[in-house]
Image: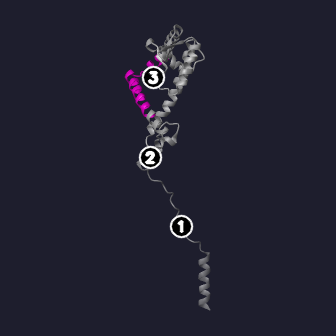
Amino acid sequence: MAGRGKSRTVKQAAAREPAPKSPPKSPTKSGPKSGQEAEQTSTWEPGPIVSSAHLAAGGMASLSEFEFGLILASHAFHRWMVRCIEAAGISGLSALDVMVLHSVAHRARSKKLADICLVLNVEDTHLVTYAVRKLEAQGLVKSGRAGKEKTVEITAKGEGAVQRYHEVREALLVRAVKGVGFAPDLLSDNAALLRVLSGHYDQAARSAASL
């Protein structure tokens, strides 16, 4: 009985004693980031500037970047031609009409329709035919014949229009581009690159048409 009472007393004393507290955990400190992690968080490199990321994901992202620049430049160039010819006093012409007008005025000699299409790389000849009709209606060009082929030549009114276009272009565009400091050789090199790439696009178009 005495042993049983002593055991009960020890158990009760143990129950009254508070359980020992575990030492507080020191807050974990993140170690220094590796060089690669620090670089990833501190710098951000954008991808190529494109309008079609699904095309840039292919084998030549730089070509997609070039195409986006070409899209912007072509629309800006077309808009410029229309505004410039309007400033020169001629309205109602499209960008293609203006290109045909300059092509006819080139070197002051008559041109065949086929040659105009070839030089401007226009596949649909009816577009050039329609442009010539619009220019004729405004008295800017006149038609003739060389054998069985139709020819087009500039008129005095057309010469005056392209000369005023030249003056507006020099004042608004040429002066601004020269002010940027572009080297003439750089522009010539880019022009050569565009002509080379146009051949690749034409060949790819022919290949696509045969599929």
Q: Amino acid at mark 3?
A: Val
List the residue tagged with mark 1.
22
> Could one spot residue 185 in this view of the protein?
yes
Which badge, 3 or 1, is on the more N-terminal residue? 1
Which amino acid type corresponds to the residue marked 1 in the rendered image?
A: Ser
Residue extending furthest toward the top: 156
> Dot 3: what SS?
helix
Residue 160 % position (x, y): 52, 9
Q: Amino acid at mark 2?
A: Ala
> Depth check: 144 or 55 in front?
144
Residue at coordinates 53% horizontally, 18% vertically from top-left? 98
Residue at image mark 3: 119
Residue 38 got which mark? 2
Marks 1 and 2, how far apart at CA: 37 Å
Q: Measuring from the top left, give residue 20's x and y in whole percent.
A: 55, 70
Q: Residue reaching furthest front?
A: 148
Foreground: disc 3 or disc 1 = 3
Q: Is residue 135 above or below residue 7?
A: above
